[in-house]
Image (cartoon, rainbow, N blue to C red):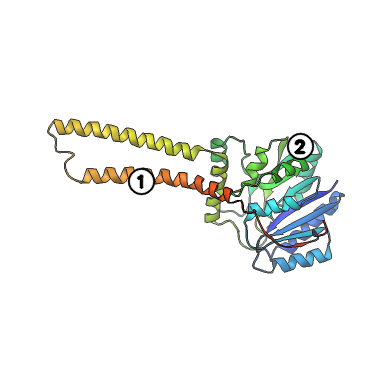
Amino acid sequence: MLLSVVAPVFNEEAIVQEFYRRASGVLNGIGEPWELILVNDGSQDRSPELMREIHACDERVKVVSFARNFGHQVAITAGMDYARGDAVVVLDADLQDPPEVIPDLLAQWRAGYQVVYAVRAERKGETWFKETTAKLFYRAIAKITDIDIPTDTGDFRLMDRKVVNALKGMREKHRFMRGLSVWVGFRQTGVNYVRAERFAGETKYPLKKMLKFALDGITSFSYLPLQLATYLGFAAAGLSLVGIIVAVILRLSGSEAFYGQASTLVSVLFFGGVQLICLGIIGEYLGRIYDEVKGRPLYIVGETLGLDEE
């Protein structure tokens, strides 16, 4: 049995060596052959150099370096593309996902489960805003999507080779891997763990990226925004119809309540805003279709270490 561990790395020069030390210590204790695939997602610091040094000292460490930054979810995909293990573990290299949880995931896999996801029972070192919005997002996406994405989970999980092969066949551009890993099915279970504080460095998911990530998750698995646009259009049309009837009645009764341009201006601005919102929602889905039909590769590899001969 070969165990593969995939870890995206983006500007983590302060962490990558400590991550290797802890991960290799855990993997050595398992007593099975293993490989660690570090995916350099276009880092601009010394991370690539440090990964080369780690590979030179331990050939079980493989390195995939992108030609530029392609994003965290694509980096996970690349690691899975190169992984050869019977089971594949995905976790971040910032040590918020402790490598020490891997034996617990592996125990559930040996018990017959094909996807074992790590559930965040506690999140240390995170702001109230981030923790609250994360909980709201997971609960909201569970309500509006057709799949049952476990709450309080991230990308930290173990997947059987059958699951990995199924995911490798999905090449959509705007990826939400924790949703895709649920969509494929198979036997799944969770393992609770305490998410640690960042070992060093800064978060790679500021508010802007978090919002884009949430939008990718919603648009990948739900048509609700499009349906809301339809409902909003019907509501606006109904409101305008009521307004027309009221205006006619008041005019015929001699009331001056609707004379002047103010009411007309407010109505035009309201319905114009509704139309722009609907167009924006449609545009989000249309843009994703455009990205798909271009047929560009998910990523471009600039360098690999320990993988060329394979």
Q: Residue at x 80, y 36 (%)?
A: 111
Residue 228, quarter of picture: top left
Q: Are marks 2 and 1 in contact (CB under 8 Å)?
A: no
Residue 10 relative to residue 88: left or right:
left
Residue 65 relative to residue 255: left or right:
right
| Near-viewer residue (105 or 262) | 262
Residue 166 visible within the image: yes
Residue 157 relative to residue 291: left or right:
right
Q: Amino acid at mark 2?
A: Tyr
Q: Residue at x 73, y 51 (%)?
A: 81
Q: Is residue 14 above or below residue 227?
A: below
Mark positioned earlier in the residue sequence (2 or 1): 2
Name the disc covering residue 113, or none.
2
Disc 1 target residue: 273
Q: Marks 2 and 1, Cα distance to the nearest angstrom?
A: 49 Å
Q: Residue furthest toward the front?
A: 294
Q: Is residue 63 above or below residue 49?
A: above
Query: Picture coordinates of residue 2 (x, y %)?
Result: 84, 48
Quadrant location of the C terminus in the rendered image: bottom right
Q: Residue furthest toward the left?
A: 254
Q: Residue at x 14, y 38 (%)?
A: 256
Q: Amino acid at mark 1?
A: Gly
Residue 93 visible within the image: no
**Which class describes the residues within 10 Å of circle 1: few (<14), some (14-19), or many (20+)?**
few
Query: Picture coordinates of residue 98 (x, y %)?
Result: 72, 52
Identify the element where label 2 is drawn: loop
Query: Picture coordinates of residue 34 (x, y %)?
Result: 83, 52
| Near-viewer residue (127 or 303) | 303
